[in-house]
Amino acid sequence: MKGLRVLDLGSGLSRHAARLAALGAEVTAVDVSSTQHERAVTRYPSSSGLRFVCAARAPAHRRHRTPLSGSA
């Protein structure tokens, strides 16, 4: 898995993300739940190759995008 980059959306407790990171992948684990995010960070505090992102904390301009004009 070395060299593989993975984006785990809806990662929850990040079990799959942690396993892939342990196998050598660079993993970004994203969850919208701040509770799940904190649980994952607590469970895997120093996992090499594993980065956690809480989407609930994303800047508002990234969370709420307006559709392009003319799109259905």
Image: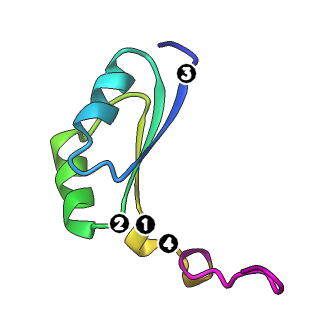
Task: Give the SS element for disc 3.
Answer: loop
Residue at the spot of label 2: 32
Residue 1 is labelled as none
Per the rendered image, the range of residues in magenta is 62-72
Q: CA distance from mark 1 to mark 3?
A: 22 Å
Task: Give the SS element for disc 1.
Answer: helix
Q: CA distance from mark 4 to mark 1?
A: 5 Å
Residue 54 point in image, percent of width and height? 38, 63
Please name the residue shown 19% across and 66% down the image.
Answer: 35
Q: CA distance from mark 3 to mark 2?
A: 24 Å
Task: Give the SS element for disc 2.
Answer: loop
Please name the residue shown 27% across and 58% down the image.
Answer: 37
Circles 4 and 1: CB distance less than 8 Å? yes
Q: CA distance from mark 1 to mark 2?
A: 4 Å
Residue 13 point in image, percent of width and height? 20, 47
How many other residues sit within 10 Å of disc 3, few (<14), some (14-19) or many (≥20)?
few
Residue at the spot of label 1: 55
Q: CA distance from mark 2 to mark 4?
A: 9 Å
Q: Amino acid at mark 3?
A: Leu
Between discs 4 and 3, the one toward the N terminus: 3
Q: Amino acid at mark 2?
A: Val
Residue 58 is labelled as 4
Between discs 1 and 3, the one toward the N terminus: 3
Task: Give the SS element for disc 4.
Answer: loop
Circles 1 and 2: CB distance less than 8 Å? yes
Residue at the spot of label 3: 4
Quarter of the image where the C terminus is located:
bottom right
User: Does 69 lie within the magenta span?
Assistant: yes
